Image (cartoon, rainbow, N blue to C red):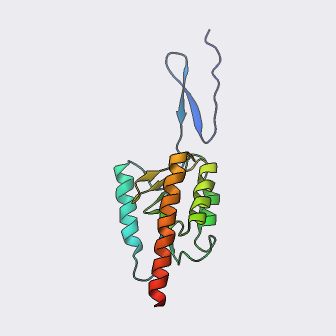
Amino acid sequence: MAPPRKQAENRENKRFPIASGGSCLLEIMGKTIAYLRVSTDQQDLETQRLEIENYAESKSLKIDEWIQVEISSRKNLQDRRISELIKSLKKNDRLIVSELSRLARSMRETHNIVHDLSKKKVELHVIKQNLITKGSNDMATKILINAFGMAAEIERDLISQRTKN
């Protein structure tokens, strides 16, 4: 007589019986969300949308939800819908952005957002920087995120200086 089969069911994984009498543990991926943000009328959400669609297709990913925001990066996390986004994400979900500066424009904010995603085990895909965090917060990821965050902050400051003069 075969031993009873345990069924572990939750959002992250599920056991399926196999013909040999054992079971196979499959990891179930969560939803994939694309976040797009532009800050001026001269920028175009459609460009980011196409970039994300092409990326998703190349990785055989299906976008479950699109979050599009037309607002300055200087606005708070709530106005930019970042707080709502982070709250909605669960373990094994994916977040895709065209570039890191779409999420944040300061090193501190970038670090905090990526840290929150990492704590939730959310996989972050940043297309232009060719970066996938895999929901981890390892040393290489920290270095890259901080470098890209610093570049975004400097870029924002330079743009601000140019428009004031």
Out of 4 and 41, give the one closest to the viewer. 41
Please count the marks in the image. Answer: 0
Apparent side of residue 11 relative to residue 48 in the rendered image (left or right): right
Q: Residue at x 63, y 35 (%)?
A: 9
Out of 154 and 42, give the one closest to the viewer. 154
Residue 141 location, x and y as percent? 51, 50
- Quarter of image, res 117: bottom right
Q: Residue at x 52, y 44 (%)?
A: 29
Q: Residue at x 53, y 65 (%)?
A: 103
View extreme (top): residue: 1
Out of 74 and 36, give the one closest to the viewer. 74
Q: Residue at x 54, y 52 (%)?
A: 142
Residue 5 location, x and y as percent? 63, 21
Residue 42 location, x and y as percent? 39, 82
Please determine whether, in this image, residue 103 is positioned above or below residue 123: below
Please determine whether, in this image, residue 154 is positioned above or below residue 143: below
View extreme (bottom): residue: 165
Q: Quadrant of the N terminus?
A: top right
Q: Is residue 68 visible?
A: no
Residue 150 location, x and y as percent? 51, 65
Q: Is residue 138 visible?
A: yes
